[in-house]
Structure formats: structure tokens, C-alpha cells
Amino acid sequence: MDKTLIIAVLSPILLTVGGLITWFFKSKREDILLSEEKTRDFKVKTYETLLEPFIVVFTFTLNENQKQKGMNKLLSLEYRKAAFNLTTFGSDEVVKSYNKIMQAFFNVKSEDFENDNEEYAVIMLTHLSDLLLNIRKDLYTKKTNLKRSEMLEFMINDIKKHQYRINN
């Protein structure tokens, strides 16, 4: 009889404690998932802002005036804020890739490759593809089998010609 009484008293207590523990961990997990989702959304907006001038450059249907407007965004306050946000919230790999493409943009000039303008394009495409691949890894999956050149195949028709140089 004592065992029955103990079981009758402990059962509701154990169920209540178990339910509270389960609720606590579920609540914490939901908070973490919500926080990760907000962070991902913020990163997506930042990355979109940072990539916009490069997208403009590779949109061959735009005229030079439209392309120049897109490139002028590099100097805007909004773009600078996005770059600052990147250094604060972006992964190490994305920050390094972004720094490389910006240094190439500032320091490597197409005029330096007068005889081989294709080489300049390959250098810039290598940096852009590296940035895109690292953004993909940061936002979605660290494990990817894609190569840098595969990040650009959708917009460059002769990518196979330059594939080896872009990937290595």
C-alpha cells in the first residue's frame, strides 16, 4: 500500500517536472532557430547589397551609363554600411574573399593587361567566384562540391575555356 501511495504521489510530480524540462529545451531551441533565421536574413540583405555592383558589371544588356551608375554604388553610404556589416557579421572566409576582390578592383587595372585583357577578366572572375562560393557556404552549407567556376556558369557562355584558371 505504501508503494501505491508513493507512485500515486510521485507520478504527477515527475510528469510535471518532465514536461517543464521539455518545454524549457524546446523554447530555447525555438529562440536559437529564430535568432539564426534573423541573422541569415540580415546576411542575405548585406550580401545582396555588396554583390549588386558586380551583378551590374556582368549584365551585358546594360549600357555603359547604367553600368557606371551601378559602379558608383561602391562609393555610396549604403554600400559602405553593408561592407561594415560584413566585417562585423560575415564569416571569416567571406570577409577575406570580399577584401581580395575589392583590393583587386582597386589595384589591378584593365589597362595593365592591354595585350591580354582576358587575363584581367579571369583575375576578377576568380575573385568574384570565390566570394560567391564563400557566401553560399556561409548561408547554407559548408559542405559543397561546387567549384568556383560553377558559381559563374549561368552567366558566362565560355566559362569552360577559363575553368582551369578560375578553379586553381
Image (cartoon, grey):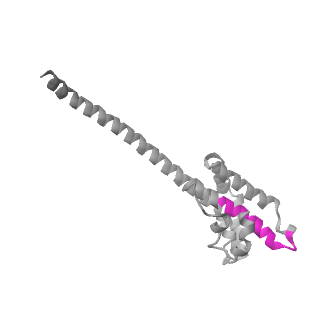
Q: Residue at x 17, y 28 (%)?
A: 8
Q: Which residues are the magenta region? A: 113-131
Q: Is residue 128 magenta?
A: yes
Vertical comparison of 50 with 92: above or below: below
Find residue 74 and report its image quarter: bottom right
Query: Which of these two is toward me, 79 or 55?
Result: 55
Q: Position of residue 25 (x, y in %)?
A: 39, 39
Find residue 107 and report its image quarter: bottom right
Can residue 125 be spotted in the picture?
Answer: no
Quadrant including the N terminus: top left
Can residue 54 be spotted in the picture?
Answer: yes
Q: Position of residue 38 (x, y in %)?
A: 50, 50
Q: How many marks?
A: 0
Q: Main secondary structure of the magenta part?
A: helix
Q: Residue at x 79, y 73 (%)?
A: 118
Q: Position of residue 142 (x, y in %)?
A: 58, 54
Residue extending farthest left: 1
From the viewer's perspective, is 14 left or right of 8? right
Q: Is residue 46 magenta?
A: no
Q: Residue at x 70, y 77 (%)?
A: 158
From the viewer's perspective, is 95 left or right of 42? right
Q: Position of residue 91 (x, y in %)?
A: 62, 49
Vertical comparison of 113 with 8: above or below: below
From the viewer's perspective, is 109 left or right of 58? right
Query: Which of these two is toward me, 167 or 79?
Result: 167
Quadrant including the C terminus: bottom right
Find residue 72 and report its image quarter: bottom right
